[in-house]
Amino acid sequence: MPQTNTEKLWDEVLNEIELLVSKANFVTWFQKTSIKESRNGIVFINVPNSFTKEWLKNKYEKSIIKILREIDPSIRAIDYVICSQHSTDYGKNSRQKTIKEERVVPQMELKDFYSSKDSLNPRYVFDNFVVGSFNELAHAAAMAVAKSPGIIYNPLFIYGGVGLGKTHLLQATGNKIREDFPNLKTKYTTTEKFTNELVSSIQNNTTFEFKENYKKYDLLIIDDVQFISRKNKSQEELFHVFNTLYENGKQIIFSSDRSPKSIPDIEERLRSRFEGGMMADITEPEFEARIAILKTKTKEKNINIADESMEYIASVLKTNIRELEGALNMLSAQTKLLGKNLTIQETKDLFNKNILYSKKKITFGKIIKTVADFYEIDEQYLFEKSRKKEFVLPRQIAMFLLREDFNGSYPFIGQKFGGRDHTTVIHAYEKISNGLKKDQRLKNDIQKIRDFLYV
């Protein structure tokens, strides 16, 4: 069928929006939208729920209006229409309206709820989760899921580097759901525990009980799902558990240190399940967020740290919230030991001795091994002259890290890589440096490598 004028108008808007936002944000916020009608200079936009409405209004409305006015100067405003039965198909030319069946979360009997077995840590709540631009999307999605489990975003897939608060956010979501929906049966676990339970069930010939146990939950949270890579039996069982829960309107939440596309050696059918709901990433916290995190932690721990010391910590530790908390614990212990608050110089001396110095203990071999392990290739391929894409990027990243983190000279690095000229190393370093400015995936990968490197 030919497109209507409103469909063509919205197509043009989406084409422009897609150039302005990330693919994940485009899929999340614009995939299920369309124009309902346009009258008297006002464009009415169909949205699937109130959460999408608020997000578009607060984050993208100015951009949408600007694009609409460039196409049709008579347009002066937009409004939103919540249409829960409306979904859009972004095919080549048409957007077909389909009826989306509302899934009602089944209520369990209270006697079936065992809070002692859900493995949730009561310390992890939304109230002590610091929100910044680095985790705003993930936090908003988790809050939406907590309000309407099994309906809004299912599954919810949160990914980001080590120590950025994924576990806190997952457990905060679980605790909020447990508080507001006490009849729902909740389970938090890690991929490692899931696999260990499966292995034990196989050994004890109780796989049927294992499957049935996981299929009875209303909320299943699985942390560190990247570790399911190469575990074929675990993938198969998780796939079947996922299907059963999803088809029955149960909420599923995953976390990973990388996006589903970046998890190697998993079945495509499982990868598609991970990508089938809402994906939200958590990046490195900005300076202001690091300060806010430190102040929140000092309040929680009832310790007194000078503002200038916190600013120094936040300027030194830039990538890992867990490291920030560890630094606070170190300062707190030293403060109690000395019986006084540390001066800024004493704080710097303590860091130089215990944290910054230890970070310098990196070897050439450790960098090579970490990069090779991350990309799951043999170390020898980093040194060969192969121009295959799967080897070139890891090789360039290894050269970059040897220059940045190991402080190796260009000639030294070139010599280590089969006697390459130093200009080759310079080229690799500059390519990665420039890529970090515009390629978020590259930035995330290098941060994860560094997380493993400095463990």
Image: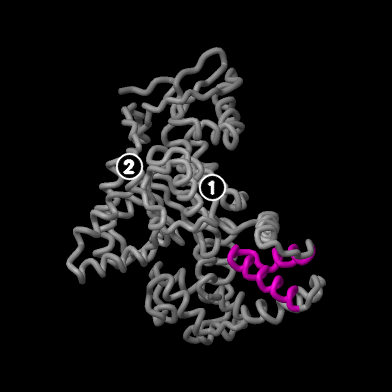
Q: Is residue 148 above or below residue 200?
A: above
Q: Based on the displayed image, in which of its 4 quarters is residue 32 positioned?
A: top left
- Are the residues flagged by discs 2 and 1 in contact, CB closer than 8 Å? no
Q: Give the percent coordinates (x, y) of residue 222.
A: 39, 57
Main SS, magenta residues: helix
Q: Which residue position holds label 2? A: 109
Q: Based on the displayed image, in which of its 4 quarters is residue 213 positioned?
A: bottom left
Disc 2 versus disc 1: nearer the observer = 2
The numbered mark, 2 or 1, whose residue comes first in the sequence reads 2
The residue stretch that appears in magenta:
308-337
Q: Based on the displayed image, in which of its 4 quarters is residue 210 positioned?
A: bottom left
Depth check: 108 or 326 in front? 108
Q: Looking at the image, what colour scheme do you see? A: one colour
Depth check: 188 or 360 in front? 188
Per the rendering, the mark at residue 139 is 1
Answer with left or right where residue 243 lies relative to residue 253: left
Answer with left or right where residue 416 lies relative to residue 83: right
Residue 328 is a magenta residue? yes
Quadrant the N terminus occupies: top left
Identity of the residue drawn at 56% across and 73% down: 400
User: Which structural element holds mark 2?
Assistant: loop
Amino acid carrying mark 2 in the image:
Glu
Per the rendering, the mark at residue 41 is none
Residue 11 is a magenta residue? no
For this orientation, the residue located farthest to the top is 40
Q: Is residue 309 visible?
A: yes
Q: Give the percent coordinates (x, y) of residue 448.
A: 51, 67
Amino acid carrying mark 1 in the image:
His
Answer with left or right where residue 89 lies relative to residue 407: left
For this orientation, the residue located farthest to the left is 205
Q: Is residue 287 visible?
A: no
Identity of the residue drawn at 47% across and 53% down: 170
